Image (spheres, helix red, strand yellow):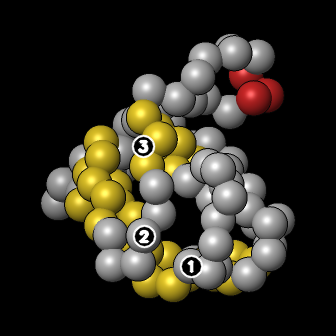
Amino acid sequence: MRLFGGGHHSAHVHPHGWISSALYVALPDQLPGTDGWLELGSPPSDLGLDLPPTQLVEPRPCRLVLFPSWLWHGTRPFGAGERLTIAFDVAPPR
């Protein structure tokens, strides 16, 4: 997944997976505050549930984050630059 300045991923789940992931390959040189961080546990704003994330994960090159696929997850927008991540799910056989 390749994102540029202002990019983000809205909170979502992966209903067919067991374990989801984010592997950070490349990041902008500087991310101020928590810009671009992974949010775990916070539902999408359009549901009207004002719940904060249960965990914030700082993106770092080569960092692999694993979490349950049923957990709401998304990313915070970031200013300038490019972010490259690889995502995959571990799913039961069909």
Q: Quadrant of the N terminus?
A: bottom right
- Quarter where residue 15 is shown: top left
> Which residue is more in the foreground, 93 or 11?
11
Q: What amino acid type is highlighted by mark number 2?
A: Arg
> Which residue is disc 2 drawn over?
60
Q: Position of residue 66 (x, y in %)?
A: 28, 54
Q: Secondary structure at mark 1?
A: loop
Please say if 94 is above or below 51: below
Amino acid carrying mark 1 in the image: Leu
In this figure, which residue is indicated by the disc labeled 1? 27
Residue 92: quadrant of the picture = bottom left
Question: Looking at the image, is 71 positioned above or below residue 9?
Answer: above
Which circle's residue, 3 or 1, is located before the other in the chain?
3
Task: In the rendered structure, find residue 75 and report the number of the disc placed on it.
Answer: none
Q: Nearer the viewer, mark 3 or mark 1?
A: 1
Instruction: Tell me the residue at 64%/72% (across/down).
Output: 30
Q: Amino acid at mark 3?
A: Pro
The foreground one among 4 and 28 is 28
Q: Are marks 1 and 2 in contact (CB under 8 Å)?
A: yes
Q: Residue at 69% across / 15% down in the picture? A: 50
Mark 1, Cα crowd under 10 Å, few <14 / some 14-19 / many 20+, is: some
Measured in 3D between alpha carbons, the distance from the residue under mark 3 to the one under mark 1, in whole angstroms, is 28 Å
Task: Find the distance from the CA under tag 1 to the CA under tag 2.
Answer: 7 Å
Report the label total: 3
Of the residues under marks 1 and 2, which one precedes in the sequence? 1
Of callouts 3 and 2, the N-terminal one: 3
Where residue 15 is drawn, which disc sits there?
3
Dot 3, how many residues are within 10 Å of its Cα: few (below 14), some (14-19), or many (20+)?
few
The CA distance from mark 3 to mark 2 is 27 Å
Q: Position of residue 78 (x, y in %)?
A: 73, 62
Q: Residue at x 68, y 58 (%)?
A: 32
The C terminus, quarter of image: bottom left
